[in-house]
Amino acid sequence: MSIAQSSSNSTPIFKCLQINLRHCKAASANLAQLILDLNIDLVLIQEPYAEQSINPSPANIPPGYTSFHSLSKDHAYGAAILIKLQHASNGRVKQIGLENSAVIIELSTTSGPMCFASVYARPLLNSPVCLLTKVLSNTNLVSRSIVGSDANSKNKLWNSAMTDSKGQDLEEYIVSHGLTIANKNLSELDYVPPKTSFVDLTLVGNSVMVQRWMFLSFESFSDHPYIYFEISCKPLPRAPAKRAVFKLPNIASLNEQIFRSHLSNTLKGRLPLALPSTPETVQSSVQELCDMIAHSAVAAKKRNPPTPFRGKMPWWSRELCALRTKTRQSLKRWS
């Protein structure tokens, strides 16, 4: 199922991968083929493989995809995002510059903007919270965010054997910022990878719906397993329709008889109004009555008498203009 296949046209579904490649060339090449095999929409990579150069970039990008990153000479400990070109076309993707170990993109979709982040928290960090704070402070879409991270923090909430101080700090940060851990409990998974410390974490905002989250049984050639998940985002609420604005006439310019008659006829078809039971229904009834009165006032406005004809020159009266028109018509028939 690709992004074009969804429950409705307004809620696209993204097929995503998350993986720490450990800066391994074989793992990078293997990932490129898997992306094509599974028709993945977006990949969140930590520690990507990149060739040594002045301006490093991820290697082995499959055809039809593009990469976003801020890799430096320290790219062995960096982060990157791969995304299908069809989703990145027409300026639909904006990268938010951060640093080597974190990359953020904002993607425009039919259900509204979404934010994707790939974050690598190095083991030397005292806490991944500082890096995650920097990531989320650079976007206004926290509730519509998806963060894939090698947090290098242990917590039983994401299946680690124990909870360390980093994991405890991260748990408190997640709860206080309205994020949700997408990782499934091991008992809910069909496949559990062996020999992993479970430090990979997938976080989503409260407007993001996770359809599936699992470990893939494919060999990754890294000491981290492939994480596969499908997500969609709740459509943004539609702006309320603008009410018609009436330019009400001055009360002195109203024909009282027409106003009373028009309002009486309008009320006959609307009364009795529903008995208000809540503040919202009271406001709705008041607005409905105001609209009736406004329509009647517009209908009863006295029409100004036609203004006397005023030509460009003072001698052109209405009679002379009519005579000139008749003369031109007569001349036309004669000729």
Image: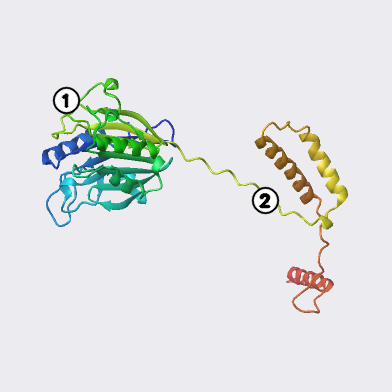
Could you say which quadrant of the image residue 210 lies in?
top left
Depicted 235 relative to depicted 254: above or below: above
Tag nearer the camera, 1 or 2: 1
Measuring from the top left, give residue 300's x and y in whole percent.
81, 51
Display coloring:
rainbow
- Tell me the residue that label 1 is attached to: 194
- In front here: 154 or 270? 154
- Tell me the residue that label 2 is attached to: 245
**Which quadrant: the N terminus?**
top left
- Report the side of 11 relative to 167 (left or right): right
Q: Residue 306 carries which label?
A: none
Could you say which quadrant of the image residue 64 lies in?
top left
- In front here: 202 or 172? 172
Q: Does label 1 or label 2 sit earlier along the sequence?
A: 1
**Secondary structure type for disc 2:** loop
- Report the side of 93 relative to 323 (left or right): left
Q: Which residue is drawn at 68% across and 39% down?
A: 283
Q: Which residue is drawn at 24% across and 52% down?
A: 70
Could you say which quadrant of the image residue 127 lies in?
top left
- In front here: 305 or 148? 148
Measuring from the top left, give residue 101's x and y in whole percent.
23, 47
Measuring from the top left, give residue 241's x and y in whole percent.
59, 44
Q: Residue at x 21, y 51 (%)?
A: 71
**Secondary structure type for disc 1:** loop
- Report the side of 173 relative to 123 (left or right): right
Circle 1/circle 2 CB separation < 8 Å: no
Q: What residue type is labelled 2?
A: Val
Question: Dot 2: within a 10 Å radius of its alpha carbon, few (fewer than 14), some, or many (20 or more) residues?
Answer: few
